[in-house]
Amino acid sequence: MKKEIIKIAVAFALFLFAILIKFQNEWINNAIFIVSYCIVGFEILQNAVKNILKGKVFDENFLMAIATLGAFCIGEFPEAVAVMLFYQIGELFQSYAVDKSKKSIASLMDIRPDYANVFRDGKEERVTPEEVKIGESIIVKPGEKIPLDGIVIEGKTTLDTKALTGEAVPKEVEEGEQILSGCININGVIKIKVTKKFGESTVSKILDLVENASSKKAKSENFITKFAEYYTPIVVVIAIILAILPPLIIEGASFQEWLYRALSFLVVSCPCALVISIPLSFFGGIGGASKMGVLIKGSNYLEALSNTEVVVFDKTGTLTKGVFEVQKIEPIGISKEELLKIATYAEHYSNHPISKSLKKSYDKNINEEQIITTQELSGLGIKAKIGEQEVLVGNEKLMKEENITFTKCEEIGTILYVSIQKKYVGYILISDKIKDDAKQTINGLKKNNIKQIVMLTGDRKNVGEVVAKELGIDKVYTELLPDGKVEKVEELLKTKSERGKLAFVGDGINDAPVLAISDIGIAMGGLGADSAIEAADIVIMTDQPSKIIDAIKLSKKTMRIVKENIAFAIFIKILVLILTAIGLSSMWQAVFADVGVSIIAIINALRALRVRREMKFLNK
Ligand code: ADP
Ligand code: MG
């Protein structure tokens, strides 16, 4: 960028010199103009030629080259140089703006750890995060970034999760807790047992996601590319007609005058403002969203969000905390202790929130050798072989499917029926809590003109209905297996209008397929399964459903900016084009208008990056 500034400064000085000092021989002035022009415009001419050779004739380089070379031909030396100078100043400003917005996203996303302190042979060693293997222990000191996902095995500390979640309040972690890479360790020294390779750690996934976000183009971006494709040739044809026709038909019209108008016309016609500001607005919107802990995987999803009509929620882990508490243990023929133990053993390898709650409640060590096989049956439960015994843990459907005779329990809550060797041995009643911001989310969505809010759950009818009623959700479908959820979403997709979009919000456990088929799949990133983060289009890092409202607001704001820029740029362009054609605007004014529109559009676009504090709805 420095080189560019020097180039422009030198050319500008020469330009001023040639304007202010009139030499006897006019050609000395002209020669200085040409030198100045070459300094500032050589690259443009070069690019124009290169692109023509590549078959891309009508781009802005071409327009600038033709217009300025034409000005030389009709003897308008100062004009030719000025146009090129202003154009380059505009370009410089643009690249500054793009650079700035990229940097501000990059700093937000400054979560890439540079090293890890790994324990090997009793010594601490500093290696790159990629070199650390699963199962190794690493030490993280205050001020360092957590390099890999893992479990804290020693010490406790406070974490700064702002870069990941947008959450300003630090998070406490202690022994036994999971820890995500990308957070910053604030005060304590902790030892972590690594559970994921660097490539699969949260930090890598998020970086990938952000880096690829701009490659998925929104419809409005594609519109601009298409627009420029047709627009430029049309403008060139009009310019040619403008140069040739009037002098032939209008009496006394000079060829030189009309050629000048035609060339000015070309200068104005350059669609730079649109071409640069639209992608920049989307880029800003995606950056703004990541500031609040919402990762959006492409401009197309940001655009789609503004047309959301139907929002479908999963229950467990999405609207409820997914942190079940064991309420009651009702054994038949065995002790309470044994019932809890056998269920916990069966659930040992499951990632389902239910499994986590059992592990919390059963605080003895688990002998992994006893667990021969386990099989997770989505939406049903677990089938496992513990020692010599076949164990089933799951819901009513599972018991029926396996022909187990059991007594139905009518209590409110999620019920885990347990059988050993096909014999029913009792149930465990667990219950979940609704997330703090769930109710506000539903109210907020209704206020934001969402036409339909639906809840889908694999849980029992009575639990699902109680939750839906409490939250004010009108439509709820319960006891669904994963493919049942897919069916329901397919039905709902048919009920929306053509432009409207359906968003599905889930935690990814038993709902990755639905995330994939909905128009916008939104996953809970902190709590959710890895498969969800991959299948989803938008990831909420804080697990707060209310962030959806912020995201919808932000997408509407971004779309408003995009539309403003399109309307503004096209309006000014057409106005100046007309003024130029009828001779009311000079080439100077034309280029000023062009650069001015670009700059205003860029400043407007950068607004999308700014997320106001009050937009952070209920940020506890
Ligand atoms: P939701 O749709 O509310 O997120 P899921 O589809 O994850 O719920 O699970 C639906 C039901 O399937 C649970 O309420 C539970 O009865 C049963 N289930 C699923 N996974 C397990 C498991 N690991 N252990 C026991 N029961 C399970
Ligand atoms: Mg779920």
Image: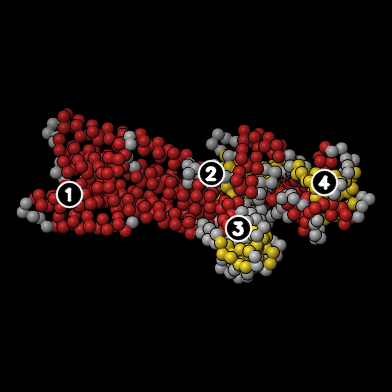
Lateral position of residue 119 relative to residue 400, left or right: left
Q: Is residue 593 visible?
A: no
User: Is residue 156 placed above or below 566 in the rendered structure?
Assistant: below
* Element on which disc 3 rests: loop
Q: Is residue 458 visible?
A: yes
Q: Quadrant of the N terminus?
A: bottom left
Q: Are marks 1 and 4 in contact (CB under 8 Å)?
A: no
User: Is residue 501 placed above or below 355 in the rendered structure?
Assistant: above
- N-term mark: 3 or 2: 3
Q: Residues within 10 Å of mark 4 (few under 14, many from 20)?
A: many
- Residue for badge 3: 132
- Residue for badge 2: 301
Most foreground residue, 501 or 459? 459
Q: Residue at x 60, y 51 (%)?
A: 200
- N-term mark: 2 or 4: 2
* Element on which disc 1 rests: helix
Task: Nearest to the eye among marks 3 and 2: give it.
Answer: 3
Q: Amino acid at mark 2?
A: Tyr
- N-term mark: 1 or 4: 1
Q: Amino acid at mark 4?
A: Lys
- N-term mark: 4 or 3: 3
Spatial CA distance of label 1 from label 2 is 49 Å
Spatial CA distance of label 4 from label 3 is 33 Å
Quadrant for residue 578, please give it: top left
* Element on which disc 2 rests: helix
Colour mapping used in the image: secondary structure
- N-term mark: 1 or 2: 1
- Residue for badge 1: 34
Task: Nearest to the eye among marks 2 and 4: give it.
Answer: 4
Q: Residue at x 16, y 47 (%)?
A: 77
